[in-house]
Structures are given as structure tokens and as C-alpha cells.
Amino acid sequence: MNPPDGPDARFDSVSFDDASSDTASSDTVLFDTAFFRAWITRVADAVEAEREHLTALDSAIGDGDHGANLSRGFAAVMRTFDVSSPRTPATVLVLTGTTLISKVGGASGPLYGTAFRRAGQALNDAPDVDLAGLAGALGAALAAVRKLGAAHDGDKTMVDALAPAVETLDKAVLAGASPRDALTAAAAAAEAGAEATIPMQAHKGRASYLGPRSVGHKDPGAASTALILAALRDTAVAIEGGHSGADAGGDTRSGDGGEHDDGDDTSGDDTGSDSTDHVA
Ligand code: ADP
Ligand code: MG
């Protein structure tokens, strides 16, 4: 899965400009619309490849539909991109979220849908964004999931994968890490966070109905969040593979999450509305 030179891996319009800032990075990497579309395409591929695994995880502590839910949702996102080609990073993410909300039921549809929409709204109408902007968007996604789902850290949900990823990414930005290093660390943090849900008892979602019997299984939403972060890392690594001299190392450890943007939509392509239902 995720061939590095897949059909949407178009990196020709990604810029690597000389940095004028005082960060440790020697280059400023800007993520453009093609990058965001390539990321979401990788997510769709990964979800399809891991569909049975996600279903198996959800069968153990839920109702066994998480793989099918996300597969249906991201397949619809791919069709939406074909029909209405998004023209900004924000539009890619808002369109992704709107489509997930309309096509995916259960808990994960509104949660992921709102997360992608809020991430897109945080980017405004910029034609491209830097690593700090990307980190801010993921922080907005986390805030949206926390607000809608009301899950705390350790409740055995997707928050337990997303929160450490955002923390790690924020710290990497402050340290001046390269996007490759920062997103590699963020993906590793999400994966570790998903693994760490295994011994947890669920306090949100269907798995919470099992009480102590939810212990001993990885949370499916945390697993899919780790896939999404891994796809982001792979997309960034593929960019650097196509451009030399963009590697400036940096160390990455914990920091604070991002902030929530409750502002208006940023794109004319966005016709949906956020779910305001509370996800239990
Ligand atoms: P459903 O549980 O409705 O069948 P899915 O199976 O698609 O929906 O998604 C389940 C995942 O959603 C869980 O593994 C968990 O990560 C996430 N989830 C459920 N409820 C919440 C919540 N309140 N806050 C955050 N994440 C949640
Ligand atoms: Mg389910």
C-alpha cells in the first residue's frame, strides 16, 4: 500500500524556499493543495488496506463497523475530489470532513468529519501552509474531537492517539525540526498512543458498554488515527524524496495541544454543517 509515487503524489508545486527565520531548519517547506490531496489519498489507500484489521478491532470491543465506515467514507471523499477539484489546502480538508459527516455514521463519522473541517478552517484560504500551520490545523482537529466527543485522555478513544501526535508536532515546531522529522515523530507518537489504549478501560463510545472487558484490546479509532498520521508522514517523506537538501534534524518531545477555531467556513466548496450532536 501507499506507493511513494502513486497517482496523486504530485510534488512539483511544493516549494522549498530559503528560510529567513531563526529556526534550526535550513529550508521552509510549504505544503500546498496537492500535498493535502496526496495525504488524503494515502489515507484512503491505508484505510482500504487496513479495513479488515480495523473491523476486527471494532468487533472485539464495538460493533465491527469501523473499517467499513471509514472505507465507505474515504471512498466517497475520493469521488468528491474527482467531481469538485479543491483549490486550497483548506478546501481539501473541509471537503473531506463534510463528506465524512454525510457518508459515515456512528461515532467516527461526526468526529473525524468535524476534525477535518476544523483543521481546514484553521488554514483559512492560504494557498500553502508551513509546518507550524499544519500543526495548528491538527491542534484544531484535536480540539474539535475533544469538544464533540467529550473524551478525556485515557478514555480509550482516538484522542489517545491524536493528542500525543499533536503534542509531539507542536514541540517539533518549536525545536525547528524538519517536516520529515516532525511528522515522523508525530506518527510514532500516534502509533504509541494507539498501542497504549490496549490496557485501558473504555469510558466513551460503544466500548464503554463492556466496562472492564474492554481492557486488552486496541481501540479501533485510535488505530485509524495512527493510520492517518502515518499517511501524513509518508506524504512528507515522499516530498523530500523528490527534493534534495530539505533535511534539518530536530528533536521532538512533548508540548501543548493546539487551539480550537470555531470560525466560519473558508471555502465555497463547503456546503455541509458540523454535527452539533454530542457523541457519547
Ligand atoms: P461506532 O462506535 O458508532 O460504531 P465507529 O466504530 O466507526 O463508530 O468508531 C468507533 C471509534 O470512535 C472508537 O474506537 C473511538 O476511538 C471513537 N469514539 C467513540 N466515541 C468517542 C468519543 N466520545 N470521543 C472520542 N472518540 C470516540
Ligand atoms: Mg463501530
Image: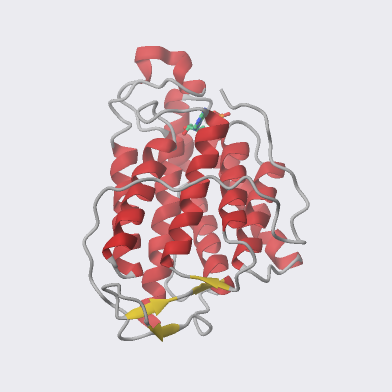
**Front residue of 116 and 2:** 116
Whether residue 84 sits left or right of residue 236 in the image: it is right
Is 123 located above or below residue 16 in the figure?
above
Residue 200 can be seen, yes or no: yes
Whether residue 195 sits left or right of residue 63 in the image: it is left
Spot occupied by residue 39 in the image (x, y as percentages of width and height): 50, 63
Is 228 located above or below residue 150 in the figure?
below
**Residue at 44% across, 37% down:** 158
Spot occupied by residue 44 in the image (x, y as percentages of width and height): 54, 56
Is 45 located above or below residue 258 in the figure?
below
Figure quadrant of residue 231: bottom left
Figure quadrant of residue 101: top right
Spot occupied by residue 206 in the image (x, y as percentages of width and height): 51, 22
Spot occupied by residue 129 in the image (x, y as percentages of width and height): 51, 69
Q: Which quadrant, please, contains the N terminus?
A: bottom left
**Residue at 45% across, 44% down:** 224
Whether residue 70 sits left or right of residue 198 in the image: it is right
